[in-house]
Amino acid sequence: MAPVPKAPVTRVFHISPEWCGQERVTQAFRLNGYRALCDDSGAVARDIVFSQATGRAALTRWPRICLFTGLYAASPAWQPPLEAWRRFAWLDRTFPRAAFILTTRDPEGWILDRLTRDGGALARCHARHLDVAPDALPDIWQADWHAHQAAVQAHFGDDPRLIRVDIDRETPADLCRRMAALMPLKPCLRGGRGCLKPTRPRACCPCWRPRRNRRPRCR
């Protein structure tokens, strides 16, 4: 077993794409008193990409935020989509006291969410900038999904700063328990109710994701 890092964790990055439980990750941190930003505006993704390209200090606009999730931008449609969750290696070098959360799920369900989100706007954006027909996206995204999982594994290995959670089989309470080795995070909601309740994992799983065709919002 890899040793637990001695230096305290100062920031946490959710390095999964959209529709992978970002709302409940944010909720778990906020209910434990941490400042968490689930960005649906694309500002954080743009900041990360621009900072990496220019060498400028990253995320200075949010000095008090602990958790960053929603690291993507797909609007306006005429701009290429930004997927800053892929920049985990740079984030690791830039923030050596950071922890990382990788939430996974069935790739086919994730692809379906991507295809149908906002009436297909996200799919049209990707198809336009990849210069492919929309029906080519499932195969491309399937390959991208597995490539990202492999890249994360190759970079972090058994580093305890990487927390993995399968949102189809586990609950936000499992995330809290695994994060507890790095920072205090209790698996409970107010009054002990709701999707963070650890005693009903199967009933809790749908709470990782918002309703289909609903824009992922966390503020």
Image: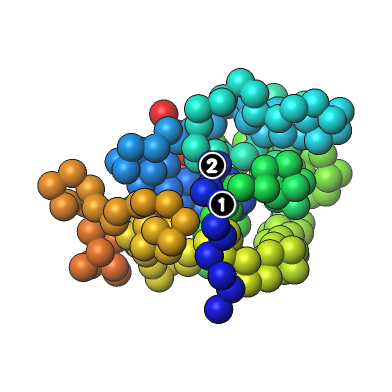
Is residue 108 rendered to the left or right of residue 140?
left
Is residue 134 rendered to the left or right of residue 117?
right
Q: Is residue 84 visible?
A: yes
In-front residue for pair 200/95? 95
* Structural crowding at the residue carrying mark 2, measured as other residues with C-alpha within 10 Å and reported as few (<14), some (14–19) or many (≥20): some
Residue 211 position, x and y percent, is 38, 46
- Residue drawn at the location 73% of the way across and 41% of the way down: 94
In-front residue for pair 172/147? 172
Residue 136 position, x and y percent, is 76, 57
- Residue drawn at the location 13% of the way across and 47% of the way down: 191
Where 185 sits versus 50, above or below? below
Q: Which mark is residue 39?
A: none
Residue 104 position, x and y percent, is 54, 63
Instruction: Name the residue tied to disc 2.
Output: 10
Indicate the secondary structure of the residue bearing disc 2. Answer: loop
Of the residues shown, which amino acid type is indicated by label 1?
Answer: Ala
Indicate the secondary structure of the residue bearing disc 1. Answer: loop
Assign the N terminus to one quadrant of the image. bottom right
Assign the C terminus to one quadrant of the image. top left
Q: Which mark is residue 7?
A: 1
- Residue drawn at the location 50% of the way across and 40% of the way down: 67
As measured in the structure, the alpha-carbon distance from the residue carrying label 2 to the one carrying label 1 is: 9 Å
Of the residues shown, which amino acid type is indicated by label 2?
Answer: Thr
Where 150 sits versus 208, above or below? below
Q: Quadrant of residue 112?
A: bottom right
Residue 179 position, x and y percent, is 43, 58
Mark whose residue sits in front, 2 or 1:
1
In-front residue for pair 79/72? 72
**Residue at the farthest bottom position:** 1
